[in-house]
Amino acid sequence: MTRDGSLIRVSGLTREYRMGAETVHALRGVDMEIYRNEYVAIMGPSGSGKSTLMNIIGCLDTCTVGEYWLNGVEVSGVGDDELARIRNQEIGFVFQTFNLLPRATALHNVELPLIYAGVSAKIRRRCAAQALERVGLADRMQHRPNELSGGQRQRVAIARGLVNEPSILLADEPTGNLDSTTSAEIMGVFDGLHQQGQTVVMVTHERDIAARARRVITLLDGRVHSDTVREAA
Amino acid sequence: MPLLEGLRLALREIANHKLRSFFTLLGIIVSVAFLVAVVAIIQGMNAYVRENLAGAIVGRNAFQIRRIPISVGLIDDEEWRELQRRPVIRPEEADYVSRAIPDAEAIALQSGWPTPMADVSWRNRTVGDVLVVGVTAPYQVVQDYETAAGEPLTEIDVRERRRVAILGFDVADKLFDNFDAAIGRRIRVRGFQVAVKGIVEKKGTVLGQSMDGFVMLPLTLFEAMYGRRQTTVISVKMPEAAQVADAMLRAEEAMRIARQLRPGQANDFTVDTAEGLITFWQNLTRIIFTVVPAVVAIGIVVGGIVIMNIMLMSVHERTREIGIRKSVGARRTDIQQQFLAESVALATLGGLLGIVAGWALAQLVAVVSPLPARITWWSVSVALGLGASIGLIFGVYPASRAARLDPIAALRFEQ
C-alpha cells in the first residue's frame, strides 16, 4: 500500500497520567499507520494501553508526546472545539456498553451526531433512517433502548457511528456485553461494513473476534508488540 | 446546536421531571406570585382611589374650599397650630365664590368633619350610627344624588330651617318597607322630629364602606341641632373636568378678597381637589413599592440557588449523557447552551406559573375583600424577565461545569 492511503499515522505516541504522586505510563511510544479500507484489530491484555490508544485515535484524548495525523491533518495539539469537530465528522464510535441516550428513540439516538453537525431536521431524519436500515433496524426506529435487545442496541450504536459517514469506525470491545450468538451477528455487521469499504478499527481481547480482522496489532506495556497482516483467503 | 433544538431538549427534560421541576420552581413561583399579586392590588387600589373614592368624597369635577386641607399626611405641630388659627369658612364667603365662578354647576355648603352620628327611628324601628350631614340644596348636585322617592332639598328648606330630612338608601331601606309611603313620615334624628322629604338612590360602597348610611338635613337645621361646625366646607362643581383648575384659581382670588388678604399674605384657607387625597395615597403606596421588591429579591435569589442546586444535580445525573454527546461531536458551547437553555426555560416557566398564581391570588383577594385588583402589564413583564435572567445567572455555573467534563471520564461514569 502507498503512503497516500494512510488514514491514521501515529509516531512516538506517549501518554502519561498523573495519579496522585505516581505517573502512569499508558503509552510509551507507539508508531503505527492504518490505511483506508483496512479492518484492524487492536489486542492486548488489560493495562496494555489499547483503550488509551483508542481514545487518542478517537480524539477523545490527546497524547502527552508524539504526533497523530488523521486524514493528512495533524491532530495532536489542536483545540477542544476542533477535536469535537473531528469526532463529529471523521470518527464513529461503538462502545462496549452501547452508550445510547436512554430516554431517546433509536432514531433520535442515531440523529445525535447530525444535530451537532448542524444538519437540518428533515435531512437528519432521512439520514438516520437510512443508517438504521443499513444495520437492519428499519422496524425499530421509534423504540427506546430499554425496549431493544442487547444486539439491537449495539446495532443502533453502529448506525449512530455510521450516520456521519466517518473516515473510521472505532469499536471498543463491541461484543463484550453480548452473548456468543449475538456477538457473531454484530461481527457480521462489521464484516459487511468493511466489505462496503468502511475502515474499521476494533479494540478487543478476544482472539476469535480479532481473527475476523485482516490485520492484528498487539500492544504490550504501552508499546506495539506485534503487527501481523493475515493473507487474504 | 441550533437554539430551537436546545429549547426542545430543555422542555422535554422538564416534562420528564414534572414534580421535581415544580418543587425546584416553588421559590420562584411564590416570589413572582407575590410580586404580581401585591402590585395588582396596589394598582387596583390606586385606580379605585382615583376613580371612585375621590369622586365619592369630593364629587365629580368638583373641588372644595376648606379650612383644613384634605391631605392629612404628615403635619408637624407648627403647621397644625397654623391651621388651627385659620378662620372658619362662613356662608357669606360662598356668595363671593359663586360671584367669581358664574359658570359653576353648583356651589354648596356642607357641615364638615367630624360628621356626627345619631340613631334614627320611626315608630318601633331604629337604625343606629347614621351619619348626619347638614347641607345647602346644591350639595345634592355636587354629589350627583338621584332621588329614589320624594323630592330633593330646596333653598327654601334651608332658608326657612324646615324640619325635613333626605334619607340615604340604606337608612330608608331599614326604616320603611315602602319608599313612597315613607315620604312625609315623621322620624326622629337624635330625638328631633323631622319629616322625610326624599330618599336618595343607592350609591353603593367604596372600599367596603356603604355610601348610603346617612341622613341629610338643611344646613340651618343641622346647625341648630349640633351648632356650627369649625370645618364647614364650600363645594364647587364644574360642568367639565377641564374647567376645574381655572375655577380653583378664581375661587382662591374670591376668597382672598372676601377675607381682605393683602398681597404677599398667605392664604388662610385651602382650595383642594381629591388630588390631595390621591397624592397622600400614592405616597403611602410608594413605601410599599420600595419594600416589595426587596422581599421579592430575597425570594428570587433563594429560588435561583435552588435552581442552581437542581441543575448541578442534573448535570451529575447526566454525566454519561454529556459524555455521549461529546463523543459524537458536541462542543463545550453546545453542552453549555443545552444546560443554560434548560435552566432559563425552567426559571421562565416558574415566572409564568408565578404570574398565573399571582393573578389568581389577586382575583381571590378582589372577590373575598373589598380591595380591587388590577394586573398591570409591567409587573407581568418584570416577572417574566426576572425569571429568565435568574435562569441565566444561576444556570451559568452548572452549565459550565457540564461543558468542562472530560469526555472519557464522563463516558465511564457509573451512577
Image (tube, coloured by chain):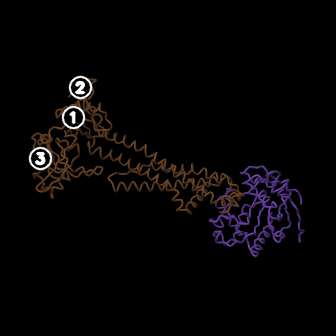
Q: SS for tag 1? A: loop
Q: Nearer the viewer, residue B88 or A24?
A: A24
State left or right for residue A185 relative to residue B235.
Answer: right
Picture residue at 21% right of the left edge, 40% below the top: B112
- Crowd around label 2: few <14 · some 14–19 · many ≥20 (10 Å): some
Confirm whether circles 1 and 2 share one chain.
yes
Q: SS for tag 3? A: strand
Q: Earlier in the sequence, mark 3 or mark 1?
A: 1
Of marks 1 and 2, the one in the foreground: 2
Residue at the spot of label 1: B102
State left or right for residue A193 relative to residue B312.
Answer: right
From the image, state the color of chain B: brown
Can residue B355 be seen at all in this image of the molecule?
A: yes
Residue at the spot of label 3: B164
From the image, state the color of chain A: purple
Q: Earlier in the sequence, mark 1 or mark 2?
A: 1
- Crowd around label 3: few <14 · some 14–19 · many ≥20 (10 Å): many
Chain letter for the residue marked with disc 2 in the picture: B
Quarter of the C terminus of chain A within the rendering: bottom right
Q: Amino acid at mark 2?
A: Leu
| Mark 3–mark 1 CB contact (< 8 Å) | no
| Res. B177 image quadrant | bottom left
Chain letter for the residue marked with disc 1 in the picture: B
Q: Amino acid at mark 1?
A: Pro
The spot of residue B277 in percent (x, y) is 31, 40
Chain letter for the residue marked with disc 3 in the picture: B
Q: Which mark is residue B261?
A: 2
Location of residue B157 with respect to B27 vertically, above or below: above
Q: SS for tag 2? A: loop
- Crowd around label 1: few <14 · some 14–19 · many ≥20 (10 Å): few
Q: Nearer the viewer, residue B180 or A184?
A: A184
